[in-house]
């Protein structure tokens, strides 16, 4: 009789213990599923594009993402969705006929440079056409801020900190004098990769001169 009683008590204890364990597991699982992952400060919350179309290579940024603290002049373009920003030889960049003589001059002789800004509202592929190479790059807040600051630092400025318009074409409002000399070993492709490197991306600007070398460097860049 006593044996049965003890057996019954042990059975009840086992049932209660098992129930308590299951309830604990359920509560823990529920609480874990309800938790939001802690932010590390390294989330890729921004994106931008590198665009390559014919002779042109540049960055495409969403204006709403750019802080005026990093690039003050973005306020002039905030009514647009995107800005395309490219760096190149001052004369050849503004020559609508793509003169072979100017191309040779730009390649062989270190020449003054400009930055061209093109604001627009449609998707870049729609603006430039299907043959355009467009590489989307994700960025943390720090990376994107650094890139915008580096682009801003590429402009020449007057003593008051204002951009200096190129005087090659008097009626042009979107070509501005830039830092650095353009030559065969320092092209628009080199400039793009150098900006990425300075912003913290794992990419090497050495040896990046042509469009093909740019694309290879971008495709090999760690995500």
Image (tube, helix red, strand yellow):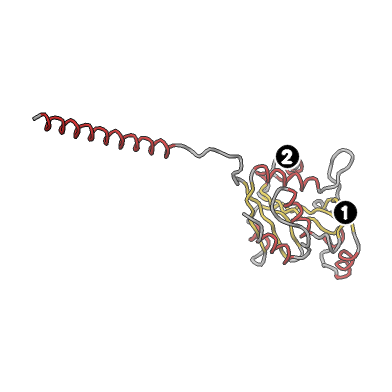
Residue 103 screen position, x and y as percent:
85, 67
Residue 125 position by quadrant: bottom right
Secondary structure under the numbered disc 2 in the rendered image: loop
Q: Marks 1 and 2, Cα distance to the nearest angstrom?
A: 27 Å
Residue 8 screen position, x and y as percent:
15, 32
In this image, 216 relative to 115: left or right?
Answer: left
Residue 110 screen position, x and y as percent:
90, 60
**In front here: 130 or 149?**
149
Please name the residue shown 87% across and 60% down the image: 91
The residue at the far bottom in this view is 100
* Comes first in the chain, label 1 or label 2: 2
Residue picked out by circle 2: 68
Q: Could you classify mark 2 by the number of other residues whose Cα lies within 10 Å: few (under 14), some (14-19), or many (20 or more)?
A: some
Please name the residue shown 81% across and 53% down the image: 115
In this image, 134 relative to 26: left or right?
Answer: right
Please name the residue shown 75% across and 42% down the image: 71
Residue picked out by circle 1: 170
Please name the residue shown 22% across and 31% down the image: 13
Name the quadrant of the N terminus: top left
Image vertical order of residue 46 relative to residue 39, above or below: below
Q: Which mark is residue 151?
A: none
Image vertical order of residue 39 relative to residue 44, above or below: above
In this image, 102 relative to 137: left or right?
Answer: right
Residue 130 screen position, x and y as percent:
64, 66
**In front here: 211 or 21?**
21
């Amino acid at each position: 009789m006593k044996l049965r009683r003890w057996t019954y008590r042990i059975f009840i204890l086992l049932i209660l213990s098992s129930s308590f364990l299951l309830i604990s597991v359920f509560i823990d699982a529920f609480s874990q599923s309800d938790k939001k992952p802690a932010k590390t400060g390294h989330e890729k919350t921004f994106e931008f594009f590198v665009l390559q179309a014919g002779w042109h290579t540049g960055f495409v940024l969403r204006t709403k993402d750019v802080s005026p603290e990093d690039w003050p002049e973005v306020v002039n373009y905030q009514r647009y969705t995107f800005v395309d920003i490219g760096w190149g030889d001052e004369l050849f960049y503004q020559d609508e006929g793509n003169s072979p003589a100017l191309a040779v001059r730009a390649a062989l002789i270190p020449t003054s440079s400009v930055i061209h800004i093109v604001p627009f509202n449609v998707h870049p592929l729609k603006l430039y056409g299907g043959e355009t190479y467009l590489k989307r790059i994700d960025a943390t807040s720090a990376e994107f801020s650094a890139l915008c600051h580096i682009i801003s630092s590429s402009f020449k400025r007057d003593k008051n900190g204002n951009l200096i318009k190129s005087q090659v074409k008097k009626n042009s409002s979107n070509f501005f004098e830039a830092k650095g000399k353009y030559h065969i070993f320092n092209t628009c492709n080199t400039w793009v990769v150098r900006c990425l490197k300075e912003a913290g991306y794992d990419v090497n600007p050495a040896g990046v001169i042509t469009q093909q070398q740019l694309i290879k460097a971008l495709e090999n860049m760690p995500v």
